[in-house]
Amino acid sequence: MAVKFLLNMWLNVTERSFRWAASGVIPGCWFNQALPDSSCLKPAQAGLTLELVSHCWKYSEFQLYQLSSLVNFPPQQLKVVMTVFYSEEDADTMRVLDFFRSQQVPNVQWNFIPLPKEQLFRRAIGRNLAAKATKADWIWFTDCDVVFHEGALDALAQQLVGRQDYLVYPQQMLATDLLPKDDPLIVAAKQQPRLMQLDLDRFSVRKLTRATGPAQITHGDVARACGYCENLKVYQQPVANWAKCHEDRAFRWLLGTQGVAIDVPNVLFIRHAEKGRYAQDSKVSNFRKWVRRVKSNLIGR
């Protein structure tokens, strides 16, 4: 017990130290010496391969929309590897993934990878595994509540040809209001797994100013060389509960960039008040929902 307490204390102190360092007081390159020079990155040619990487823990309704979008709007100008990290303890997500395993989609390869939930809860672990193993020209680290509507991926392919950036991101996404758990959009997706589409009338423009956690599109050469916070061991430690994703900021810090904005239409973001990572209707869940509503009202989105 004492050893576990001391280990957790050390991890907390270490993570806080890296959060402070990632504010810019220390150059990220000190911890990422494997980062290749941008001039050495291989420019992708037409017909490139993109790997999409998401995690799913009790978010099966949103994963359903994400995977449906690849079936409803299969990419024409690129090949897509859809990687989903999940836990076999999450029965609803298992049912959704089993449904899509049987879907044959041109230019789409399903890559569903189970992890022990303690590894799933630290998102950087799965992202690092995908980064080191990817054979794609570019890899998009995203979340399962991001949906690729009609034309989004083909437009992205046109933007990525010939680029030698470390990190790019869509300059805007289309987002819903903050949805309660009884919203029809959410309720419908919790029924029997099936193909579903979203009504764009529910979405409005949300500008991005940097490559945030669900919008980090990284050159494949960079991913293979550096992984995803691979050298920051605190972000590669399994945890008992879902960890706040501070490694997103650390990843940008390690690359020395906030990312380059590019024009990618029809990338959708389903904003939701109920978080699967917390026990439903628990004090933590209710407090977090209250915080999200207050923040949403303050910033007007």
Image: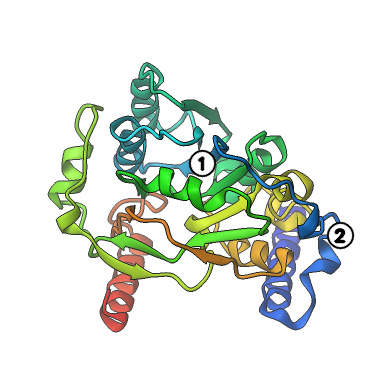
Q: Which part of the image, by quadrant, shows the C terminus?
A: bottom left
Task: Judge from the rendering whether residue 36 lies leftward or rightward of residue 125; answer left or right.
Answer: right
Residue 240 shows up from this direction: no
Quarter of the view holding residue 263? bottom left
Quarter of the view holding residue 163? bottom right
Residue 211, horizontal then vertical, whole percent? 54, 64
**Residue 290, placed above or below residue 127:** below
**Residue 105, placed above or below residue 264:** above
Q: Residue 52 — which label?
A: 1
The amino acid on which the numbered mark 2 sits, given as a three-letter code, is: Gln
The amino acid on which the numbered mark 1 sits, given as a three-letter code, is: Leu
Q: Residue 1 — which label?
A: none
Label 1 crowding class (10 Å Cα cut-off): few <14, some 14-19, many 20+? many
**Residue 38, placed above or below residue 26:** above
Gap between marks 1 and 2 measured at Cα: 26 Å
Per the image, the residue denoted by label 2 is: 33
Residue 166 shows up from this direction: yes
Residue located at (56% from left, 42% from top): 120
Residue 1, horizontal then vertical, whole percent? 71, 52
Residue 10, horizontal then vertical, whole percent? 76, 64
Residue located at (41% from left, 56% from top): 264
**Residue 245, placed above or below residue 147:** below
Residue located at (35% from left, 19% from top): 103
